[in-house]
Amino acid sequence: MTNAYAPEQVIRRVASLTAERLSHFERLRIVTPVNTSEGPRYYTLDVRRITLLCELTDDFEVNEDALVIIMSLLDQLHGAHSKLEQVVQAIGAEPSEIKLRLLQRLHDVGAVD
Amino acid sequence: MTQDPYTALGLSKDVTADEIKKAYRKIARTDHPDLNPDDPVAEVRFKDASHAHDLLKDPKQRRRFDAGEIDASGVEQAPRGYYRDEARRPENPYTKSRPASDGAPFGEGFDADSFFANFARSRSAAGNGDGFARGRPGDRPGQDTQYRLAVPFLDAARGAKTRITLPDGKALEVTIPEGARDGQTLRLRGKGELGFGAGRPGDAYITLDVTPNPDFERDGDDIVVTLSISIDEAILGGKVPVNTVSGAVNVTVPPGANSGQVLRLKGRGVKGRSGKGDQRVTLRIVSPPKIDDDLRQFMEGWRVNHSYNPRVGKETS
C-alpha cells in the first residue's frame, strides 16, 4: 500500500511547505487529503503534487488563480491520458484484423502520419 | 562528475539572483517533467538545472559555494520523483471528478457512444451541464465538491455507514455500498456547495480508498485467504473453521490435502455486478512446533513400508 503521511509529516518532507500553505491549497481544492479515522492523510501522489504546487508558487510566482487553472488543465491532461491508455489497451486485446482496420481508419482521419 | 551549477544554468559567476531565477525558469518551462508530462527525457534535461537552482537560489548557500566551502554535490538529493509518475495511474483521484456512467468504462453494457461522448467532454463543462441553461439569470447551480475517504477492507466488502468531517466542521453521511471497490467514486446528489438563487446545490463526489487487510485479499469479486492446517488435518481431512468477510464458517478439508490446494467457498466473496463472488481458501500445511518422539517413531516406522515420491517427474539430476 502507498505510504500515508500525516499533515506534519508532509510539512517536514516538503521544504517550502507550511501548515498555512497546505490548508490554503486545500481551500483552493487543488489538494484533497484522504479522510481516515485518524485524521487527514496524504499519499505519495499527494506529496508530489504538493511539491509541484510549491514549485509553481515559489519558482514561477504563479498566483492562486493561475495555479488552480494550471492544475485543472494538468488533471484533465492526465485524465485524458489514462482514458486513452484504457482505449489503447482495449484495442490491444482485439484480434489483429480489427487493429488493422482501426489503423486504416485513423489514417483516414489523419491521426496517423 | 557533478556539473558546475553556473554552467548547468548557462550563466557566468557574476550574475544576480534574479538572473539565476530567470535562467532556471527558462529551462524549467521546457524541461520540468510535470510541465511537460509527455516528454520522457525532460527529466534528464531538467535534473542538472534543478540541482543548480537548488544550490544557487539561497544567497547564503551560493556565497558558501562561491567561497569554495561547499561543492556542487552539497545539495545532491536522492532522486525525487515527479507528480506525473503517480498522476498517470487510472486511480488518480484528481483526474476524475465524476464516476463513469456505471463505474468502469468497459463494464457490462458498455455503450461506445456515451463513452466517447464522455471522453470528449471536459469536466468543467460537464459540471455546468444541466440546470444552467434554464432558470432565471442569477440562478446558478452550486459547485461540486470532491472528497477522498479511507475505508477499512471489511467495511468495503460488507457495506457500511460512515461520515466524513468536512473542513468547516460539518459532517457528511456516507453509505458505502456492499462490495465497494478501491478507487470507486460515490456521488451524493445535492451535497456539494449551495447554488445561487434558485440554482440546485452541487454534488459531493467521494473517492474511496480501501485499506488493505492482513487476512483477506480481494481478486475481482473473490476473496482470497490462506488457511493453515495441521498435518493430521491434512491427512485425515475434516472441518476447519476459517474467517470470511461475513464471519467464520467451517470449510471441509478433504483427506490427503496438499499445501497450495485451493478450496472454494461459493458465494462467500464480495457482492459484484454478477452476484456474489467466492472465497478461495489456499491451504498451507504447518508441521507441529515441536516434533516429539511419538511422531518421530511413527514416521520412521511408517516410512519403511510406505515410502512414496512426491517429486515424480521432477527428480534432481
Image: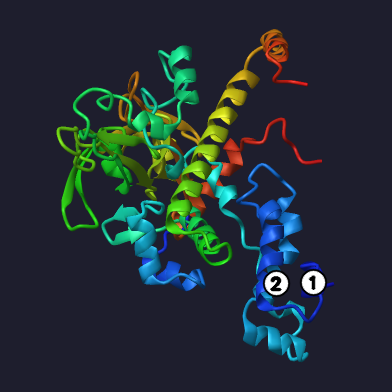
Q: Is residue B208 left or right of residue B43?
A: left
Q: Nearer the viewer, residue B191 or A46?
A: B191
Q: Is residue B101 above or below residue A40?
A: above
In the picture, the quarter occupied by the C terminus of chain A is top right
Q: Colour scheme in the image?
A: rainbow
**Disc 2 to disc 1: CB gap under 8 Å:** yes
Q: Is residue A1 above or below residue B103?
A: below
Which residue position holds label 2?
A: B19
In the figure, residue B289 lies in which quadrant? bottom left
Residue at the (29%, 39%) spot, across then down:
B144
| Crowd class of label 2 (few under 14; some 14 to 19; many from 20; radius 10 Å) | few
Q: Is residue B293 above or below residue B259?
A: below
Give the mark, 2 or 1, whose residue is nearer the N terminus.
1
In the figure, residue B81 lies in which quadrant? bottom right
| x and y percentages locating residue B148 in the rendered image | 34, 47
- Find the residue positioned furthest to the right: B1
- Find the residue positioned furthest to the front: B137
The label on residue B305 is none
The label on residue B11 is 1
Do tags 2 and 1 sit on the same chain?
yes
In the figure, residue B39 lies in which quadrant? top right
Residue at the (39%, 27%) spot, across then down:
B100
| x and y percentages locating residue B279 in the rendered image | 37, 31
| x and y percentages locating residue B120 in the rendered image | 50, 24
Report if residue B254 is visible in the image: no
Going by the numbered disc 2, the residue's amino acid type is Glu
